[in-house]
Image (spheres, rainbow, N blue to C red):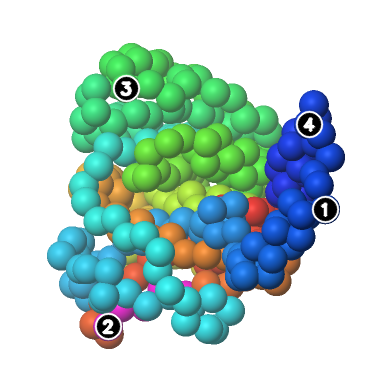
């Protein structure tokens, strides 16, 4: 950006000398006097600074989507310091949703593949045809784009997801790649919905690295983790066994750091409730923007509301400087 500004400043000066006679001594004196009387411009260049955009979901303690807040209800902290909100948007809007389905070998256990197929079908049915857009990806050790982003949701409905699950599970790698594809969509109400059993046996990336990638591009990751009833005996986030508990905790943190959440589902009722909640939250989100900090690198951010009893979900930070541009 600096070289572009310098170039723009140089071009008028060069163009002004071409094909013109040299100014007289009197003209030079008059010009110098005019410059002395003209105040120096302030080098703010705000028009050239990319804004940080943050998508925010707000719920009451009872889980109701809160859709009546105003700009004055929010406070933004950048690295612990309050910053001014430049723009504020609050309305329902079309959704851009990528559905990422786990078809790896671990999904063959306990009917989880059938639960996952049902979750994909429920999600496609609950989107608004010709209004929302969706894409379908599958993964085992590799990521595959089955249906590219489309408003013709029948294309997602009609895909056959039959077949035996097979292969290693590169869950975290697949999330990072698909989140990047979602980040290129123009809709402000965009997200990634991952349907999986939560196991990862083949990723190069760690959950922390994936959270950083998705958070930096403002793509909320929602994890719908399917489980057998024995693994889901006591509530929405309870898991059976120490290993399962560790995996669940890691996935919860990954989702929350990006501004999403995780649900654990073992019955059709759980699946239906989770899908409805995710889409309701995506349908109404607040979008704010502010000027990025001058310090290059990662900036942790926190979004607060004046009403302390509300649950706020938003990405955990952004990258400022040449590597991130404050996006």
Q: Which mark is residue 151?
A: 3
Residue 289 seen: yes
Of residues 25 and 176, the one nearer the viewer is: 25
Count of numbered badges drawn on the protein: 4
Q: Label 4 belongs to which residue?
A: 20
Residue 262, position as x, y percentages in the image: 41, 58
Using residue 187 as the reference point, say whether residue 7 is left or right of it: right
Residue density around tag 1, few if under 14, some if 14–19, many if 20 or more, within 10 Å? few
Give the structural element (helix, strand or loop) at label 1: helix
Left or right side of 5 for 303:
left
Q: Which stretch appears magenta?
A: 302-306
Q: Secondary structure at mark 2?
A: loop
- Sequence-wise, which precedes: disc 2 or disc 4? 4
Crowding at dot 3, Cα within 10 Å, few <14 / some 14-19 / many 20+, comes out as: some
Give the Cα distance between marks 2 and 4: 62 Å
Compute the Cα span from label 3 to label 1.
69 Å
Q: Residue 25 got which mark?
A: 1
Question: Vertical placement of 25 versus 12: above or below?
Answer: below
Which numbered mark, 2 or 4, is in the foreground of this view?
4
Q: Are marks 2 and 3 in contact (CB under 8 Å)?
A: no
Kindly check if marks 4 and 1 are in contact, taking CB atoms under 8 A apart as contact.
no
Q: Is residue 308 left or right of residue 323?
A: left
Are the two marked residues, 3 and 1, in contact with CB atoms closer than 8 angstroms?
no
Q: Nearer the viewer, mark 3 or mark 4?
A: 4
For label 2, count other residues whose C-alpha is less than 10 Å away and answer few (under 14), some (14-19) or many (20+).
few
Q: Nearer the viewer, residue 199 or 173?
A: 173
Point 54% across, 76% down: residue: 78
User: Which residue is denoted by mark 2 in the rendering?
Assistant: 306
Mark 4 and mark 1: Cα distance apart in space:
15 Å
How far apart marks 2 and 3 lie (CA) works out to 37 Å
Q: Earlier in the sequence, mark 3 or mark 4?
A: 4
Q: Earlier in the sequence, mark 4 or mark 1?
A: 4
């Amino acid at each position: 950006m600096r070289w572009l500004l310098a170039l723009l400043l140089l071009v008028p000066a060069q163009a002004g000398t071409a094909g013109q006679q040299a100014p007289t001594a009197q003209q030079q004196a008059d010009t110098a006097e005019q410059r002395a009387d003209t105040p120096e411009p302030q080098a703010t260049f705000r028009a050239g600074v990319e804004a940080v955009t943050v998508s925010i979901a707000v719920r009451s303690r009872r889980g109701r989507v809160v859709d009546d807040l105003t700009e004055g209800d929010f406070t933004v902290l950048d690295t612990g310091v309050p910053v001014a909100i430049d723009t504020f948007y609050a309305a329902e809007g079309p959704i851009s949703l990528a559905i990422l389905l786990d078809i790896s070998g671990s999904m063959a256990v306990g009917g989880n593949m059938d639960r996952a197929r049902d979750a994909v079908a429920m999600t496609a049915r609950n989107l608004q045809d010709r209004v929302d857009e969706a894409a379908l990806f599958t993964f085992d050790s590799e990521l595959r784009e089955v249906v590219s982003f489309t408003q013709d949701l029948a294309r997602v409905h009609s895909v056959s997801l039959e077949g035996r699950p097979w292969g290693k599970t590169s869950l975290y790698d697949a999330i990072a790649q698909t989140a990047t594809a979602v980040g290129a969509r123009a809709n402000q109400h965009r997200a990634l919905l991952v349907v999986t059993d939560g196991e990862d046996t083949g990723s190069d990336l760690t959950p922390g690295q994936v959270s950083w990638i998705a958070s930096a591009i403002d793509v909320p990751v929602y994890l719908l983790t399917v489980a057998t009833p024995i693994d889901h005996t006591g509530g929405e986030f309870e898991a059976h066994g120490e290993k399962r508990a560790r995996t669940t905790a890691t996935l919860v943190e990954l989702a929350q750091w990006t501004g999403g959440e995780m649900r654990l589902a073992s019955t059709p009722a759980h699946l239906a409730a989770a899908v409805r909640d995710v889409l309701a939250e995506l349908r109404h989100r607040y979008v704010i923007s502010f000027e990025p900090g001058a310090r290059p690198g990662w900036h942790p951010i926190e979004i607060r509301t004046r009403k302390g009893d509300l649950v706020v979900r938003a990405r955990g930070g952004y990258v400022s400087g040449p590597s991130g541009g404050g996006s």
